[in-house]
Amino acid sequence: MTLKETFESTVFLLGAGASYEANCLISKAMLGKLHQAIIDIPQDHILYKDYRNTFIELYQFIRPSLSFQSDLRNIRSGGADLYSPNIEDYILIIRKIINKDYIIPEPLVGSWSERLMRLEIKYDNIFETYLNFIYEKVIEWITPTDNYKAAEELLAPFATLLKETNDENYHINIFTLNYDLVFEKVFNKDSEFPVNTGFNSDGLWDAKWFDSEDAKINLSKIHGSLDWYLNEDDTCCLTSHEVAFNPLNPDERKPHIILGFEYKLFSVDPFFILLQQFIQKLKTSRLLVVIGYSFFDNYLNNIIIRHLNSNENGRVLIVDPSWESKDNPEEAFLKYLRQIQADTSNMNMNNYTTLYSSRLEFYKNDKGLASGAKNFYADFIGDKCSKLLSFHHQINTESLEF
């Protein structure tokens, strides 16, 4: 197979774990840092100096409820220890309070309702202000402080591949659930090998831009990006790969991202089109490489399971070091997936729960190193993708035997 044929048959899906080695925090770790971040608010902070004690009170108010919710979901999943509190669930509760949703997360009842009302009377838009503070922290935690040096090391195999095969015609299709700018900062800084994120030369969203031959990497950011924002007429725009957020005036403009919402399927562009493109690319691919994704998105899981079960030649290669210590990773993963898909707490009543084990593969580093994104890229993208080519050959051989 040529590189063009290989990448036409391969789709990459990246979760938070794919950016972990670039020094971007995952959602669970962010929640662990939130309390200290509140305590560390400077006394002379231009925006939040008067809110420190109130933010601490809100944190102590919401955090136990979040633990309660996670424990309840674990019970509903058959007692498995699947769910643990994270920053997205925390933000979701704040949104519910702001929107005064009818379903208030247990146990935010009783005397707490009165305390909420007192806080809202004392501070105008207190929950919106608290949410802005958390947004600022989330952006900080997924923006590496090392000037993207670790990101360059992480993606070095891609950079080498692009340089060594510059005269070849191919496109790498990467779909990511992450908001960070890891790929953009590494590849767009000198514009030699720019990453195509679906925006035209004027910085306006245009799905047809993915048909451009100018870039070898098509990066589809299904849940949005730190450098996207909505202008006055709700057109999605790009900020030249700088964060679309002004901490001194957080209400002025925020990154256009799906963060802390109960459902991650938005029927507006660019989100809807990007998800449809993911589905279409799967139909023409034989290999889905999933890196650092926890499989907690039921809708996305349904897309993946339906595709694999209906395609006898399809395979999913999971890159996640948490599975390498299991005696039988296939059996453990399938049980884990069934439990997640059986969870009806978000009213997902018709999830696919069964994935054929013959479609499932796990990456394991041959040298005994951690089976994370960095070593996977070195193995499968390095040496002009020789291992990825061999993996496709293996799939083709198995299909012929079948």
Image (spheres, helix red, strand yellow):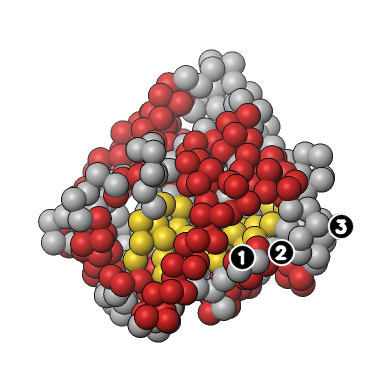
Residue 231, by quadrant, is bottom right
Front one among 86 and 126 = 86
Which residue: 41% across, 30% down? 33
Image position of 118 (left or right of 12): left
Q: Pointer 1: what residue?
A: 7
Disc ID at residue 224: none
Residue 59, by quadrant, is top left
Which residue: 24% across, 44% down? 325
Q: Are marks 1 and 2 in contact (CB under 8 Å)?
A: yes
Image position of 30 (left or right of 157): left
Q: Are marks 1 and 3 in contact (CB under 8 Å)?
A: no
Amino acid type at image mark 2:
Tyr
The nearer-to-camera label among 1 and 3 is 1
Q: Please tell me which of labels 1 and 2 falls first in the chain.
A: 1
Amino acid type at image mark 1:
Phe
Measured in 3D between alpha carbons, the distance from the residue under mark 3 to the one under mark 2, in whole angstroms, is 25 Å
Q: Residues within 10 Å of mark 2 (few under 14, many from 20)?
A: some
Residue found farthest to the top: 43
Q: Residues within 10 Å of mark 1 (few under 14, many from 20)?
A: many
Residue 78, by quadrant, is bottom left
Measured in 3D between alpha carbons, the distance from the residue under mark 1 to the one under mark 2, in whole angstroms, is 7 Å
| Relative height, residue 116 to residue 278 (above, below) | above
Disc ID at residue 202: 3
Q: Pointer 2: what residue?
A: 170
Residue 262: percent from left, percent from top = 41, 61
Q: Secondary structure at mark 1?
A: helix
| Relative height, residue 336 to residue 314 (above, below) | above
Image position of 373 (left or right of 75): right
**Which quadrant holds the C terminus?**
bottom left
Visible residue check, residue 10: yes
Residue 386: percent from left, percent from top = 56, 54
Residue 219: percent from left, percent from top = 65, 57
